[in-house]
Image (tube, helix red, strand yellow):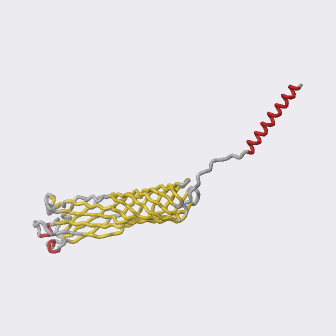
Amino acid sequence: MKQMATAILTAACIVTLGQAAKAADVARPIYKPASAPVANWSGIYAGFHAGWGQTSGDPGAASISTTGYASPVFETPNLDLKGNGPLFGGQLGFNWQVNPSWVIGIEGDITGTGLKNSATGTPMCMPPFCNPSVSIAGASQYMARDINWLASLRGRLGYSWASSMVYFTGGAAWANVSHRADSADAVFVCNGGGGGGAGCSYPASFDSTKTGWALGAGYEAMIAANWSFRAEYLFYRFGGTTATAAGTPAAACAVATCRATYTFSDFDIHTARVGVNYRF
């Protein structure tokens, strides 16, 4: 009888302890790991950037025509004006974080560039003045294009998570470009026929600000309070231009009325750059 009472008491204790443990499990709070904070991209920011750029596009071309012969009398092979160089500038923008994942904004920037290139070619005397075509010994033609600065005003659309954001951007762009060209001793027909044309040249030099567009994408990450780092690619496209130059000195080119035409073709710019921004 005593053994039976002991067994019943033991069983009751086990049941009571089990119920107490179950109650403790129910009462114990469930802890979840804290999620990473979502960065706030909204507001005004400013910063600077640096990188490298490369130009591409069709070559530039130079030709010389006269009033007294079929035009053009002289022409040169197309001159390759592709170049590359460093970039450095600054940006100012505003973001609006419409929800934790999506960010829209607008940004303006200006960038100084070292994108410069020049090329030379040997003019050809063309029919009907020369038949067959021949190169003109001692003559040369020269063209150069220097991109002084780039600017853009672009919209931005970004996707944000944690402290990072990827974005697409596009809008209007401007490029200030210096053009230089010359054709030296190339037009002996403008110096009385077979005299060689020594001393007759057709220099041209002018600046222009071209309007085009830019499109690109990038990645940006918060690296400290109010500071972020970015890496981005931008593609620019601009139209070309044409210039006409009279011969100089006039006395050396006076027998026939000759003019040189320089065609600087449309061009593209590919840029890769990194930068930092400070959010106010």
Point out residue 115 in the picture as x, y percentages from the top left corner.
33, 61
In the current view of this chain or complex, which residue is farthest to the right? 1
Residue 152: quarter of image: bottom left
Point out residue 86 in the picture as x, y percentages from the top left corner.
35, 59
Q: In this rendered view, identify the residue nearer to me: 201 or 108.
A: 108
In the current view of this chain or complex, which residue is farthest to the left? 195
Q: In this rendered view, identify the residue nearer to me: 145 or 123.
A: 145
Q: In this rendered view, identify the residue nearer to me: 128 or 267.
A: 267
Q: Residue at x 80, y 34 (%)?
A: 15
Point out residue 131 in the picture as x, y percentages from the top left corner.
13, 59
Q: In this rendered view, identify the residue nearer to me: 277 or 91.
A: 277
Would residue 67 appear left or right of 99 to someone viewing this image? left
Would residue 128 appear left or right of 245 to someone viewing this image? left
Q: Residue at x 85, y 30 (%)?
A: 8
Would residue 194 appear left or right of 109 to someone viewing this image? left
Q: How many marks?
A: 0
**Quarter of the image where the N terminus is located:** top right
In the current view of this chain or complex, which residue is farthest to the bottom? 251
Would residue 149 appear left or right of 24 to someone viewing this image? left
Residue 117: quarter of image: bottom left
Point out residue 269 in the picture as x, y percentages from the top left corner.
36, 59
